[in-house]
């Protein structure tokens, strides 16, 4: 894996919209690709957004500024890359299903898919795996597996990526949504929106080892690099819960902005970036930056409306945030702690993932 040093030299504060569209005609097997060009953002890497509103994935090439938007078989809620970079994973339900105006509401009974795409060529025919009742998020491990939360059936589907099949199902709390692996891969933490808990899954036995009460409407989880703490966004409390992973106990809560959704800890463990989406009636457009030493918000950064997904470059230099209401991705310079670029993508971007150059 090649890790690219990122430097946003001369980046524009506001990006120009996509200038050209590729021929939208296709043979029914290969998705149409929408292509655009923005100013170059950085020296390498790609950011992928899951655009739930128009059933597409947008790929932003940070070296060239090019944006390719590709239609896929589902309205994707979340995306992630496998550690080896072989697959870009997306989960969602067919585009005819209603995905909810809050960006994390999913209809029970909707059969969803895991879509495996080639990140080097998104136009290739993807592989799909039937998952079950309304998948929300997906995360791969280093053993060729992917874990997908099924919000409608209160379980995690375990997928063998080589075989393209579901090999196990694990029960969780009510309405599992965001999920992340502990850095050492031994445990999977799952945010259960409707019962205010986090399920701790043993990734060896593939069973629920514990269930930790955290607060109202937990949506996503993020770990410090050493795995000693987990942070959980509490949408209906406007707070972030802090879990001590050794004791599996709640250690405290931190006030953030309205309707916090996704969050991520920086690679050095110094900060947590929390996207505050707000509500349908009052959408927010901010990111709270938590200092992990003091346990306090040290800065609030204004982004686009409906800040939702968060991803961070491998070197920690830049943070990427999807804005559901503005159909864009904000690029935050982590050193300056301010938005340095806004990139138009597909409609209602939700999840987001960064991949280094290869």
Image: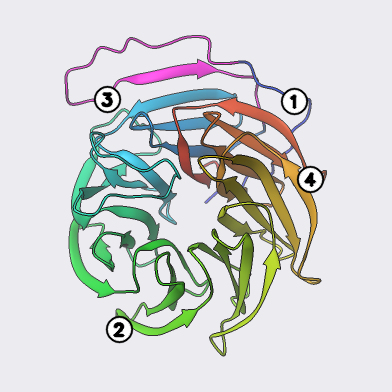
Q: Which residues are magenta?
A: 17-41
Residue 13's disc number: 1
Q: Is residue 319 above or below residue 140?
A: above
Residue 296's x, y, as percent? 78, 65
Q: Residues within 10 Å of mark 4 (few under 14, many from 20)?
A: some
- Determine whether the residue tagged by mark 4 lies in a helix, strand or loop: loop
Closer to the chain start, of discs 1 and 4, is 1
Q: Is residue 216 visible?
A: yes
Residue 313's x, y, as percent? 62, 48
Residue 143's disc number: none
Q: CA distance from mark 2 to mark 1?
A: 48 Å
Which quadrant holds residue 51? top left
- Tell me whether circle 4 and circle 3 mark residues in contact (CB < 8 Å): no
Q: What residue would you read off at disc 3?
A: 31
Residue 161's x, y, as percent? 26, 57
- Tell me whether circle 1 and circle 4 mark residues in contact (CB < 8 Å): no
């Amino acid at each position: 894996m090649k890790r690219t040093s990122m430097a946003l030299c001369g980046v524009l504060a506001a990006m120009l919209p996509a200038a050209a569209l590729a021929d939208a005609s296709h043979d029914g097997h290969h998705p149409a690709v929408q292509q655009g060009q923005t100013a170059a953002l950085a020296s390498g890497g790609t950011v992928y957004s899951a655009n739930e509103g128009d059933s597409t994935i947008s790929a932003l090439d940070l070296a060239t500024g090019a944006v390719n938007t590709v239609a896929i078989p589902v309205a994707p809620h979340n995306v992630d890359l496998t550690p080896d970079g072989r697959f870009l994973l997306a989960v969602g339900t067919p585009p005819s299903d209603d995905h909810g105006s809050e960006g994390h509401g999913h209809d029970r009974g909707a059969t969803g898919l895991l879509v495996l795409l080639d990140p080097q060529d998104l136009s290739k025919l993807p592989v799909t795996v039937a998952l079950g009742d309304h998948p929300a998020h997906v995360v791969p491990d280093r053993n060729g597996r992917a874990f997908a939360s099924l919000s409608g059936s209160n379980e995690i589907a375990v997928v063998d990526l080589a075989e393209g099949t579901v090999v196990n199902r694990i029960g969780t709390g009510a309405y599992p949504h965001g999920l992340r692996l502990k850095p050492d891969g031994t445990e999977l933490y799952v945010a259960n929106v409707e019962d205010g808990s986090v399920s701790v899954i043993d990734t060896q036995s593939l069973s629920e080892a514990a269930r930790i009460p955290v607060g109202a409407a937990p949506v996503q989880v993020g770990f410090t690099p050493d795995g000693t703490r987990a942070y959980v966004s509490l949408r209906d409390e406007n707070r972030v819960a802090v879990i001590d992973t050794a004791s599996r106990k709640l250690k405290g809560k931190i006030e953030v902005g309205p309707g916090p959704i996704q969050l991520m800890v920086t690679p050095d463990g110094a900060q947590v970036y929390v996207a505050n989406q707000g509500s349908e009636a009052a959408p927010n457009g901010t990111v709270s930056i938590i200092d992990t030493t003091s346990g306090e918000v040290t800065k609030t950064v204004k982004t686009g409306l409906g800040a939702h997904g968060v991803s961070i470059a491998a070197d920690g230099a830049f943070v990427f945030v999807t804005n559901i209401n503005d159909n864009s991705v904000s690029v935050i310079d982590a050193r300056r702690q301010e938005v340095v670029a806004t990139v138009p993508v597909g409609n209602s971007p939700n999840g987001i993932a960064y991949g280094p150059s290869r």
